[in-house]
Amino acid sequence: MRVRRVLQTSGESAARVPGGASDGRWYGERRLRENTNQFIFKIADVLEHFTRYVVFQPGDLIAMGAPKGTAMSQPNAAELYLKPGDRMEIAIEGLMSLRTRIVEERL
């Protein structure tokens, strides 16, 4: 997977992390919407913690879990799960956007 650099250098980044909308879109249809202020762990705090132990490089990702509204919580969950070939976009307003295609796991 190729990921474009979106954060500035470590000293600049944590101070610039905004509170804003977090969106998950499937083929352009909004499936998830959450405000980063409602995350259990604030993005700036997560960055501060992990940069004590890890030197991040452009393209590195931090997975912080899923907000409410995921497929599992829906009555038609089986229809909503992502499948190989699906296109998904995740964005945090003012910070980053990631577009990706779901691929089948290779064992």
Image (cartoon, rainbow, N blue to C red):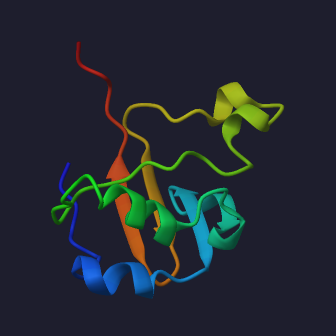
Please name the residue shown 47% across and 80% down the image.
17
Name the residue at the front extreme. Answer: 52
Residue 10 location, x and y as percent? 26, 76
Please name the residue shown 38% across and 53% down the image.
62
Q: Is residue 78 left or right of residue 106?
A: right
Please name the residue shown 60% across and 80% down the image.
19
Query: In the figure, residue 60 lies in which quadrant?
Result: bottom left
Q: Is residue 32 left or right of residue 107?
A: right
Number of numbered markers: 0
Image quadrant in which the C terminus is located: top left
Query: In the figure, residue 7 lies in which quadrant?
Result: bottom left
Question: Could you say which is closer to the camera, residue 42 or residue 90?
Answer: 42
Q: Is residue 106 left or right of residue 25?
A: left
Please name the residue shown 23% across and 19% down the image.
106
Name the residue at the right extreme. Answer: 75
Q: Is residue 12 left or right of residue 46?
A: left
Q: Is residue 11 above or below residue 54?
A: below
Residue 104 location, x and y as percent? 32, 25
Residue 79 location, x and y as percent? 66, 30
Question: Could you say which is closer to the camera, residue 31 or residue 21?
Answer: 21
